[in-house]
Image (cartoon, rainbow, N blue to C red):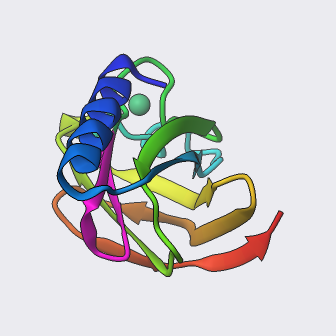
Amino acid sequence: MRPGSLVASVLCCFWLLSMNNVVCKKYLFEFKTANKKRYFGTGTDSIVYTTFNHDMSTEQSFDGHPSGVFENGRRDKFQLDIPFITEIVSLQVWLKGGGSSSDWDVDYIKVTDGVTTWRFNYGGKTMKTDQLYDLDAVRSDN
Ligand SMILES: [Ca+2]
């Protein structure tokens, strides 16, 4: 968990609770970067943004710049409090920044609330900055 993400999610949930009585819940995100022989270029140093179901109140950001994060073959995990979602049907992903190390080859992104897991497959293909990737959920009970 990155300190910035924690502060952002605490502030987000405090604001939502005070404004709308929205209930937050812990979600564990797992990002699997493709494992390729071509080591250079599979990982990203971008900021990775996500939302569920095209709902901007669920927006999160994950910093790919710290050493080793979102690099070749890695599974990076982040636990976050975000507004409760009854059912996740899709995940939107976009990248910002990252300079010459911005492209990212992604196997899958997995999200679990401890009861249900939603998996978003991307098959090791390349994501590029400033494009929106809309991934359908494959749901399974834990
Ligand atoms: Ca990185």
Please name the residue shown 32% across and 42% down the image.
13
Residue ID at (46%, 37%): 40
Q: Where residue 118 sits in the image (x, y, percent)?
A: 63, 68
Q: Is residue 60 magenta?
A: yes
Left or right of 128? Residue 23 is right
In terms of image quadrants, where is residue 92? bottom left
Image quadrant assignment for residue 41: top left
Look at the image and give the residue range highlighted in magenta. Answer: 48-61
Q: Is residue 133 above or below residue 57?
A: below
- Residue 11 position in % (x across, y down): 25, 32
- In this picture, is 73 found above or below 89? above
Q: Is residue 104 magenta?
A: no
Name the magenta segment's main secondary structure: strand
81 or 44: nearer the eye?
Answer: 81
In the picture, the quarter occupied by the C terminus is: bottom right
**Ligand 1 picture quarter:** top left
In the rendered view, would you say 10 is above or below 126? Answer: above
**Up/down of 57 relative to 67, above or below:** below
